[in-house]
Image: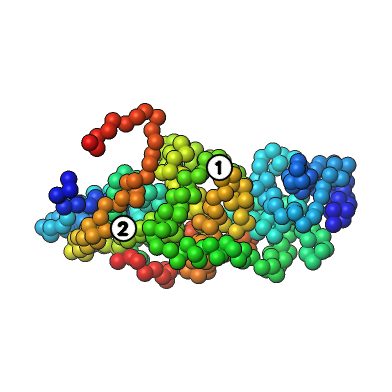
Amino acid sequence: MENQEFEPKIVAFVCNWCTYAGADLTGTSRIKYGANVKIIRFPCTGRIDFMLLMKAFENGADGIIISGCHPNDCHYSTGNFHARRRWVVFRNLLNFSGIDTERIQFSWVSAAEGFKWADVVNNTIEKVRALGPYENYKKINVPTLFAKEDNNE
Amino acid sequence: MSDILINKVKQLLSDKAIDIFIGHGEGTGGRIRPIFVRTPEDAEQLIFNENCKQSWANYLLKPEVKAAGKIGMMATKHALRAMMQLASEFQIKDNEVLALYWDNNELKSSADFKEIEAYLASQNHDILPHEQEMIDKLNAMTTQERWDFWQKEYEKCIKCYACRSACPMCYCHHCAAEGNQPQWIPVASHQLGNMDWHLMRAMHLSGRCINCGACAKVCPMHIPLNLLTYNLITPIQQEFGAIAGMKHDATYALSTFKTEDKENFIL
């Protein structure tokens, strides 16, 4: 394990109408980007609950990308505006409680921006690679009722 | 002060202006507890002194209290702000709750939102200096130091949810913490579940917190969890110009938006 280079796990929460289509375009345009990213498709950025970010970290993500339509470009007119306010507040809260907001990348990627999507993903991967695994979260002790088999040895 | 209050409540109850009055009463060991007065005779138990700082606003929406009829309440500044915030969330109507409050040693009574707003506008609503100091201290720390600080605090949490019960803004009939499909918050009180709970609580109260501090006061483990929501008050006010509990017709900061909202972190 130690000799291998750390490969960050990135979870991307994207909206169906812009970024998901944009990521599709990246693929059909044959643009290569990191395979570290797991894309989860949502109807709209407004649907991306802040708790999902917590759950992503809980389940071993080292970094998170959240992306949707540009302002004024939302399929549902206002979803991304609502989301933007929520992120401003949530980012503030995460920062205050000591969660590394450097690991969370917010972006607007439209369905025509295949290149931008590849850039966002690659840059995030590099940023998180430099930060290393999210040890703080991985070290959280969750006692279970039954003793876990020790697989670390 | 108590005599003026008792006479006023007696009169209100005998005039049938209110059916139930929520006020401060004597608890065990010199503590203050809420009492619910329904008859003029019971009003004798009411007290009011410098220790009566508690807000009873979280009783306003309890079905068992509402069932009694028209509610009167001894209101502190925080209780009045809670009332305004509840009104803005369509939980209480104008002239539904009669609030009694002290304005320069004069007992005033009002159920009119406009009057209460005018009174609130004349008051200072800043958070306490030692709380602001603590927030500034935390904000000056590194991310890792803040993480360590809060993990140590969350570790103490026993998930009694007293913070939720005391909060006048936590009135959902079905709290997300109890939901198990999906299970957002682990039931057991371990580090992860505690952190999830406190962050979710803070986020659900962001832009709604009226900085009454009830959550931290009732916490049996003395977690300074009020700081989580207090810290969000300034940015929300600065970024969105919204302040909770000052206007009965205010819009919740996170349920609205402006196309020109600013942010500096989205690519």
Res B132 → quadrant:
bottom right
Which label belongs to residue A103? 2
In the image as oriented, which residue stretches furthest toward the front? Answer: A153
Q: Percent from the top left, x then y, of residue B51?
A: 75, 54
- Viewer-proximal residue among B136 and A69: B136
The chain that hosts pointer 2 is A
| For the residues bearing labels 2 and 1, Cβ distance under 8 angstroms | no
Look at the image and tell me whether residue B119 can be seen.
yes
Q: Is residue A104 above or below residue A148?
A: below
In the image, taking residue B251 as reference, residue A152 lies left or right, namely left
- Judge the density around disc 1: few (<14), some (14-19), many (≥20) Cα neighbours within 10 Å: some
Q: Residue at x 59, y 51 (%)?
A: B216
Q: The disc labelled 1 sits on which kind of residue?
A: Tyr
Res B4 → quadrant:
bottom right
Q: Residue at x 39, y 60 (%)?
A: B143
Q: Percent from the top left, x then y, of residue A113?
A: 21, 64
Q: Residue at x 68, y 45 (%)?
A: B59
